[in-house]
Amino acid sequence: MPELPEVETSRRGILPYCKNQLVTGVIIRNFNLRWPVNRSLANQLSGQRIENISRRAKYLLFETDRGTLILHLGMSGSLRVICNDEPALKHDHVDIQLANKRTLRFNDPRRFGSIHFTRRPVEQHKLIRDLGPEPLSADFTADYLHSTASNRKIAIKNFIMNSRIVVGVGNIYASESLYLAGIHPARMASRISLSRYEKLVTSIKQVLRAAIDSGGSTLNDFIQPDGQPGYFQHHFRVYGKSGQPCEQCHRPISQMTIGQRSTFYCAQCQR
Ligand SMILES: [Zn+2]
């Protein structure tokens, strides 16, 4: 599943080919994504210039004069920039044709992705308005997490995976950052000191930045006609490593279920 680093890598991969390009046409082969694609999308977007592509949480925001296209890759979605005459394959649901004779193509086998267009300020959109701060922004601080956590009787892992608290910390990155911070994933969010939250915020930023950096090597994949661009393998310290030795204490990594999600941690190093 594309996590925040993959979405950010997708943004960087497609941006050079889409920025300041006029949309000359939109082809929608399948309207049945996670939510039905609005029938007016082609009309709304055609003739508009893509001024920029930004990102909020795991949403890509295509900014035009008329409004903003909000695209989510879902569980299995990917974007590619191809030549206009490249034949569509199975699961190629949406094409956005550009004046530079290229096409931005959205492929999504499982169809959990989504596409919306809004003419109102995007921060007021129902998908966006309740989101917490971006993890890599200056708004995401230990003070913020610590004060928000007071009275929260939930496991820290569930707390940081809640997109109203902070966006983009998926299951993998929650396990990895808690390991780096030495915090047990089941510890109550309200029972963690400010100084430990400082470590956690630093760790979250560190693991996400490292993953985004490692995506840099895949940027050229976005103009290949096939494949799954932006999906890359990271080096994980605990995720998926139950039974293997901890890098710090060499005891076996443990696994438990928190909030119905597999959670990996070191029982020795994380308290
Ligand atoms: Zn350990």
Image (cartoon, rainbow, N blue to C red):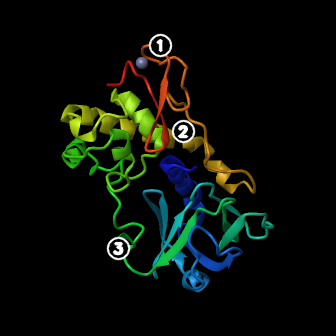
Name above or below for residue 12 compared with residue 123: above
Classed neighbour count for the residue bearing mark 3: other residues with Cα under 10 Å, few (<14), some (14–19), many (≥20): few
The residue identified by callout 3 is 124
Taking the view exactly as shown, the residue that stands out farthest to the top is 250
- Pick whichever of labels 3 and 2 is earlier in the sequence: 3
Mark 1 and mark 2: Cα distance apart in space: 26 Å
Q: How far across and how far down the image is residue 77, in percent?
A: 62, 58
Q: Residue drawn at (52%, 53%), measured in percent from left and top?
A: 7
Q: Residue drawn at (34%, 51%), measured in percent from left and top?
A: 166
The residue identified by callout 2 is 214
Name above or below for residue 228 compared with residue 47: above
Q: How far across and how far down the image is residue 128, in percent?
A: 39, 66
Which numbered circle lies on residue 110? none
Name above or below for residue 64 compared with residue 2: below
In what quadrant of the picture does the C terminus appear?
Answer: top left
In screen coordinates, is 150 left or right of 27? Answer: left
Indicate if the residue with disc 2 has its beta carbon within 8 Å of ligand 1: no
Q: Quadrant of residue 174?
A: top left
Name above or below for residue 258 compared with residue 118: above
Element type where label 3 sits in the image: helix
The residue identified by callout 1 is 250
Mark 3 and mark 2: Cα distance apart in space: 33 Å
Classed neighbour count for the residue bearing mark 2: other residues with Cα under 10 Å, few (<14), some (14–19), many (≥20): some
Taking the view exactly as shown, the residue that stands out farthest to the right is 87
Indicate if the residue with disc 1 has its beta carbon within 8 Å of ligand 1: yes
Q: Identify residue type, mark 2.
A: Ser
Tell which tag, 1 or 2, sits nearer the viewer. Answer: 1
Q: How far across and how far down the image is residue 51, in percent?
A: 48, 71
Q: Identify residue type, mark 3.
A: Gln
Camera-side residue of 139 and 167: 167
